[in-house]
Amino acid sequence: MAERRTQQSELTEKVLTINRVAKVTKGGKKMSFSALVVVGDGKGRVGFGYGKANEVSEAIRKSLVDARKGLFAVPIVGTTIPHEVMGKYGAGKVLLKPAAPGAGVIAGGPIRALCDAAGIKDILSKSLGSDNAVNVIKAAVEGLKGLRNKEENKRIKGEQPK
């Protein structure tokens, strides 16, 4: 239990969007809130979460719990990603390209937060489809999950490492 707490305290948390949602019922409008957050350790582990509740603080708490559950590892070569990749989710499409050292994170909004949380220092990105933050972040996550390093490629192809 103690190890879990120290592991979670290393994670950086960034709230991306808080959205007020109105459900129209027979009795009037029922207001609630949704929150989108990104968590990461800056060393290649990152996750995102989405939570809904009647209060902002509760929505953020739920999304943080969701983000910690969905942590995954991103292969990083030096300060960038190993190869170019396209992530797709719904109408969202995100192109992620490796960049030269010193180029920085060339990304907008949700993708920038995701890369910063993962510890990627140099990357080029372009959002090609939807501008909805949830779809963009899910497309970027699909792209990052599709990354492979050289050792994984050789293992998948059945080659022996040199």
Image: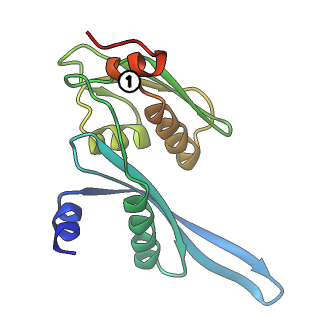
Q: Residues within 10 Å of mark 1 (few under 14, many from 20)?
A: few
Badge 1 element = helix
Q: Is residue 22 above or below residue 48?
A: below
Q: Is residue 145 above or below residue 8?
A: above
Q: Quadrant of residue 101?
A: top left
Residue sitting nearer the eye, 33 or 160: 160
Indicate the position of residue 2 as horizontal and vertical percent values. 16, 73
Residue furthest to the right in view is 26
Q: Name the residue carrying label 1.
A: 152
Q: Is residue 51 left or right of residue 155?
A: right
Q: Residue at x 43, y 17 (%)?
A: 84
Residue sitting nearer the eye, 131 or 162: 162
Indicate the position of residue 34 as horizontal and vertical percent values. 53, 67
Which amino acid, by three-letter code, is at mark 1? Answer: Glu
Indicate the position of residue 155 as horizontal and vertical percent values. 40, 21
Q: Residue at x 22, y 75 (%)?
A: 1
Q: Is residue 147 above or below residue 57?
A: above
Residue sitting nearer the eye, 120 or 133: 120
Q: Quadrant of residue 139?
A: top right
Indicate the position of residue 119 as horizontal and vertical percent values. 24, 38
Q: Is residue 104 left or right of residue 107?
A: left
